[in-house]
Amino acid sequence: MFQPENYEAPKVLHRPLQPPRTSVPREGLYLAAWQQFATERPLEWVRIFDTSGPVRQRAASVAASFMVFMGCNGGNSFTQQALRYRSSGVFCSAESAFLAAWAIENRRIYWINHGLRAIEFLLSRDYPIDQGHFKDRVDWKKVPAISMDDVDIVESMVAWWSTKTAELMREMVEAQFKAQEASLRAQQREGQ
């Protein structure tokens, strides 16, 4: 029988496979918020995941990579679509709305993102698109092999992203982002 008081969280680092880009501040803000949550609440963190595999370092890295992705335009687009689905009343739960939005966001469409799935982008260690003189192309050697455990972890994160805790995290990060933008604008005005 599981007893939380006897639970010892696995020793993991909540580091993404690819660090957040400094040119996309929300990526770093979401990752920092996630790292704080995951380290301060290890029992909640491990309970997020519905997978047949162990929740160890790979799961921690995949989850952190998901959070970085939530800070980019693709993650924001997914989140906004999921929120529209949730408010439509078509789905029986917020979780179902978010999972449906993820299924659409993650599908392979050859004319969008060079035919790569969202999960392939978010789990890439290197940017998988080579930019050529006349046409960009996928460097398939840079596209990661996605395991079912990876899929389970990402889907678990999508389900968690639909929760009140995640909603509060999004609100906190957006407030931090707006404060950073305001500070930057003020500095720019002073420098003129």
Image (cartoon, grey):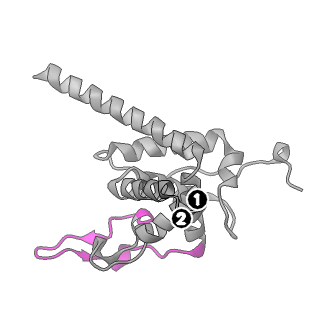
Q: Position of residue 23 (x, y in %)?
A: 28, 46
Mark 1 crowd level (few <14, some 14–19, many ≥20, 10 Å Cα): some
Which residue carries the number 2 mark?
99
Q: Where is residue 62 in the image (x, y as percent from the top left)?
A: 53, 60
Which residue is at the far front?
89
Labelled disc at residue 104: none
**Magenta includes 113?**
no
Under circle 2, the secondary element is: helix
Does any portion of residue 65 appear in the rendered image? Answer: no
Mark 2 crowd level (few <14, some 14–19, many ≥20, 10 Å Cα): many
Which residue carries the number 1 mark?
95
Between the C-alphas of marks 1 and 2, the distance is 6 Å
The prevailing secondary structure element of the residues shown in magenta is: loop
Range drawn in magenta: 122-148
> Residue at the spot x=43%, y=56% of the render?
84
Under circle 1, the secondary element is: helix
Image quadrant containing the C terminus: top left
Closer to the camera in the image, 53 or 15: 53
> Residue at the spot x=72%, y=49% of the render?
9
State if disc 2 and disc 1 touch (CB < 8 Å). yes
